[in-house]
Structure formats: structure tokens, C-alpha cells
């Protein structure tokens, strides 16, 4: 079945959707699931785990909530928050699988002896902060407000990486402001380019400063449905991925949602190993070590579909790469930043100040009028107001060859 989660956005005209096509996996022994995770073989996850596991990093999954009782996720999922049902927890979701699937690709640790069974994420020691904004196909909140609030909540509650496996054809102002707020606070924001297969931009992937991600298959070729109009920066495995499913089962899926989760996981690995790097410098490491398929040698970058290429986390973790400018390849947040936007608790402060200002004008106006009255008999007071794939020879691993297109 096709799995799309449509969410009503601003004025009811924009739609936010969880961007994966999901199929329930046939019954299989949990230990065989790991064998089908081709992305782990492609990335050489065993080598990566010796360098970084994402320990100490919290990744916010803004999605449908997460089933923290799944055996492959137990202990890695924080309570989070439900933005649809009065602010309760978001770590016991059992009706909607998308958020659980994304969490498993990021921070699944498997289970059983040696954790050898089930799904393993790329950053198995990272923590997941589940933020529920989507349910049963439609956003009940009625606008992008829930997503925007979730992004702000994530930043304010310790998430240094924010996974947005969702897309909208319209960029709502409240959503853009929340993304800008996250940038100002130093979070790495990752979003899926979308599954239209066309040029139409999607949001939040197209907002400045967001790492927009396309999907590639096991050979490194771009997925035919991966959107290429959202200012793609990177690409990652997004085709025929196994992930955690409902009722502690498993499923296969394809989409830029999965690719987004893998880039978020790679960002978590880097944040754990290089805690002093900025979000832009994390993105710089991913960009500088990304690769294109061999037939694309000499392609001018960023390519509209691949961006700078598919990620190679091991290389990003181990190569000698200067930190570079604070913003790296990401545009700097605009001067009109969300950090300057008053919070609800602060919103009364400008009004109080303006009121004091107006009171001062009135006092001086009355005094002036009295003086002028003595001289001319005319008083004037002015008051101003302010307004399942078999692991192939990997193009992703540290052994991959190809052009080095970065500057």
C-alpha cells in the first residue's frame, strides 16, 4: 500500500506529507532483517561504529510519534511531546508507523544476543525526541502551527539535529520562522526533498539553511521519484529500506523520508565526534566527502538531483577537513531572525514599554501646554504611538572512488 501522510497547511491550501512508500515486510526471523539493510553494508557501519555511535546527541523526529516499546528502540526514545492531543507523550505511538520507521533508521540498536537481530540505525547510541504532529493521514492541528511549534520545542529541549521527513508545496511563514529559530540556536535541520519526481520546490527542504535530501538506490543512482526542485544539497539511501514497523514488526519502504533519516543519523555521528562544530561545519563535512556515481564524473556541482552527491559517513568522520566558515555551505540565517521574535511570555514587554513612553509624552505635553498657555493661550498636546536489497559493491563506503568535486 502507498503510505502518504497528508497534513493540512496554511489556509487549507498547502499539504505536508510524510514522504515514504511503505510495504509490510513478510514474516521473517528478526535476525534476517539485518541482512536486508543494504545501507549499513554500503556505509560500512561496522567501521563507523568504531569511530562514533551518536552518543550524547539528541535527534528530534518531527513526525507521527514513535513506538518506544519496539525492541529495536527500547531505551533510545525520550518521552517527547504530542502536539495533537493536548501535549502528552509521543513515545507510545502504535497506530502510525512512519515516525517509528524513521527513528529506527536513525537510532535503532537491534535486539537479542549482541543486538544482532532486528533493525540497526546508523547512530545506534543517539537519543530520539519524538514530536507528534501528524496522525491517521491528516494534520488535526489545522495548519503548520504544530510542525512549527515542534521545531521550536525540539531546539529548546536539547535536540541538536532535527529530522523533518515531511514535505509541503507551500512555505508557510510560521514554519519558516521556526526553521530560522533552529538555525539561530545551532541545530542541524534536515528535510526530505519530496517524492514528486519533478522540479516543484517543497518545504521545509527549500528554506535557506536546511539540508535538503534526495534519495538514491543501492547503486548510488537517484531514485526516479526523488524531487529535484528543492535545492538538494545531499543524497542518501532511500530505496527498498527495511525499518521498524507496527506491532514490533518490520517493513520495507522507499522515499526521501528514509534518505533524510540517514542524513540526520550521519549528522548525529558528526555532532558526537565533533561537538564544537557548528551546524554549517557539520554540513561542510558531509558535502566535502560526498560522491557522485562514476558516470557523472565532471558534473558541475551542486547537481539539481544529487546536490553534492551521496553521503559517505565514514569519510566525513575520519578525513582531515578544515572546519571552515561557521555557515559552511548553508546560507546564513536572515537578519530578521526568529530569535528576535518575542515568545508568548515576552509579548507583553513591548506593549508595557510603549505604554511608559506614551505616559512620558503625556506628562511633558501637559507641562508644555501649561507653559505655552501662559505665553500664547494655546495648548497643544501630541501623543505618539508605536505601532530488501542484497548489499552491492558500495559506492558509499570509504573505499569508494570517484570525483572530488568540492571546492
Image (cartoon, rainbow, N blue to C red):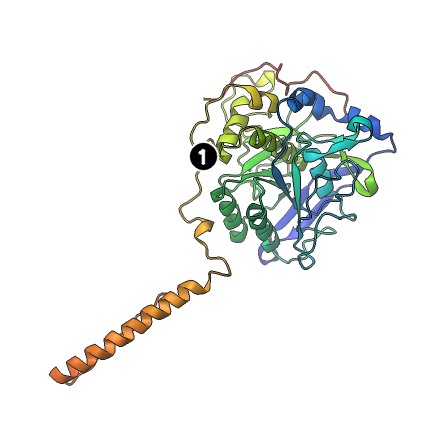
**Of all residues shown, which one is farthest toward the left?**
375
The quarter holding residue 194 reads top right
x then y, percent, for residue 325: 42, 30
Q: Quadrant for the N terminus, please.
A: top right
x then y, percent, for residue 147: 60, 50
Q: Is residue 290 visible in the rendered structure shown here?
A: no
Q: Between residues 305 and 68, which one lies in front from this camera angle? A: 68
Q: Between residues 49 and 241, which one lies in front from this camera angle? A: 49
The quarter holding residue 191 reads top right
Does residue 387 appear left or right of residue 57 in this picture? Answer: left
Q: Is residue 354 visible in the rendered structure shown here?
A: yes
Neighbourhood count class around disc 1 (C-alpha, 10 Å): few under 14, some 14–19, many 20 upward: some
Residue matched to label 1: 327
Q: Quadrant for the C terminus, please.
A: top left
Residue 346 versus residue 193 in the image, above or below = below
Q: Between residues 349 and 198, which one lies in front from this camera angle? A: 349
x then y, percent, for residue 294: 60, 16
Does residue 132 appear left or right of residue 110 in this picture? Answer: left
Going 54% across and 22% down the picture, which residue do you hit? 289
Going 61% across and 35% down the picture, which residue do you hit? 56
Going 44% across and 33% down the picture, which residue do you hit? 326
Total labels: the figure holds: 1
Residue 141 versus residue 116 in the image, above or below = below
The quarter holding residue 114 reads top right
Callout 1 secondary element: loop
Q: Between residues 157 and 13, which one lies in front from this camera angle? A: 157
x then y, percent, for residue 296: 57, 19
Amino acid at each position: 500500500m502507498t503510505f502518504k501522510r497528508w497534513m493540512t497547511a496554511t489556509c487549507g491550501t498547502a499539504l505536508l506529507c510524510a514522504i515514504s512508500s511503505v510495504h509490510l515486510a513478510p514474516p521473517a526471523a528478526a535476525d534476517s532483517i539485518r541482512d536486508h539493510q543494504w545501507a549499513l553494508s554500503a556505509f560500512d557501519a561496522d567501521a563507523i561504529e568504531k569511530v562514533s555511535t551518536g552518543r550524547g546527541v539528541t535527534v528530534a523526529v518531527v513526525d507521527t510519534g514513535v513506538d518506544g516499546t519496539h525492541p529495536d528502540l527500547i531505551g533510545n526514545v525520550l518521552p517527547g511531546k504530542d502536539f495533537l492531543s493536548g501535549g502528552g507523550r509521543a513515545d507510545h505511538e502504535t497506530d502510525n508507523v512512519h515516525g517509528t520507521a524513521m527513528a529506527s533508521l536513525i537510532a535503532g540498536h537491534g535486539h537479542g544476543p549482541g543486538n544482532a537481530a532486528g533493525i540497526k540505525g546508523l547512530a545506534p547510541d543517539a537519543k530520539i525526541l519524538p514530536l507528534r504532529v501528524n496522525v491517521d493521514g491528516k494534520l488535526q492541528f489545522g495548519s503548520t502551527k504544530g510542525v512549527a511549534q515542534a521545531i521550536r520545542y525540539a531546539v529548546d529541549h536539547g535536540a541538536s539535529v532535527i529530522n523533518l521527513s515531511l514535505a509541503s508545496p507551500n512555505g508557510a511563514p510560521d514554519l519558516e520562522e521556526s526553521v530560522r529559530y533552529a538555525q539561530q540556536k545551532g541545530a542541524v535541520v534536515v528535510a526530505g526533498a519530496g517524492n514528486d519526481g519533478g522540479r516543484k520546490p517543497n518545504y521545509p527542504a527549500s528554506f535557506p539553511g536546511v539540508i535538503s535530501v534526495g534519495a538514491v538506490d543501492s547503486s548510488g543512482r537517484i531514485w526516479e521519484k526523488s524531487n529535484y526542485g528543492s535545492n538538494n544539497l545531499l543524497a542518501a539511501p532511500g530505496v527498498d529500506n527495511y525499518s521498524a514497523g507496527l506491532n514490533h514488526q518490520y517493513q520495507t519502504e522507499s522515499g526521501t523520508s528514509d534518505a533524510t533519516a540517514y542524513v540526520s543519523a550521519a549528522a548525529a555521528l558528526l555532532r558526537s565526534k565533533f561537538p564544537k562544530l557548528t551546524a554549517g561545519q557539520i554540513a561542510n563535512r558531509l558535502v566535502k566527502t560526498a560522491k557522485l556515481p562514476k558516470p557523472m564524473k565532471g558534473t558541475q556541482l551542486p547537481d539539481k538531483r544529487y546536490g553534492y552527491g551521496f553521503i559517505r559517513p565514514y569519510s566525513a568522520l575520519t578525513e582531515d577537513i578544515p572546519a571552515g566558515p561557521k555557515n559552511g555551505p548553508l546560507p546564513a540565517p536572515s537578519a530578521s531572525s526568529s530569535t528576535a521574535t518575542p515568545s508568548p511570555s515576552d509579548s507583553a514587554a513591548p506593549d508595557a514599554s510603549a505604554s511608559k513612553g506614551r505616559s512620558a509624552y503625556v506628562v511633558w505635553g501637559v507641562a508644555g501646554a501649561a507653559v505655552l498657555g501662559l505665553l500664547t493661550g494655546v495648548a497643544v498636546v501630541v501623543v505618539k504611538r508605536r505601532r530488501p536489497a542484497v548489499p552491492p559493491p558500495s559506492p558509499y563506503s570509504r573505499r569508494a572512488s570517484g570525483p572530488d568535486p568540492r571546492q
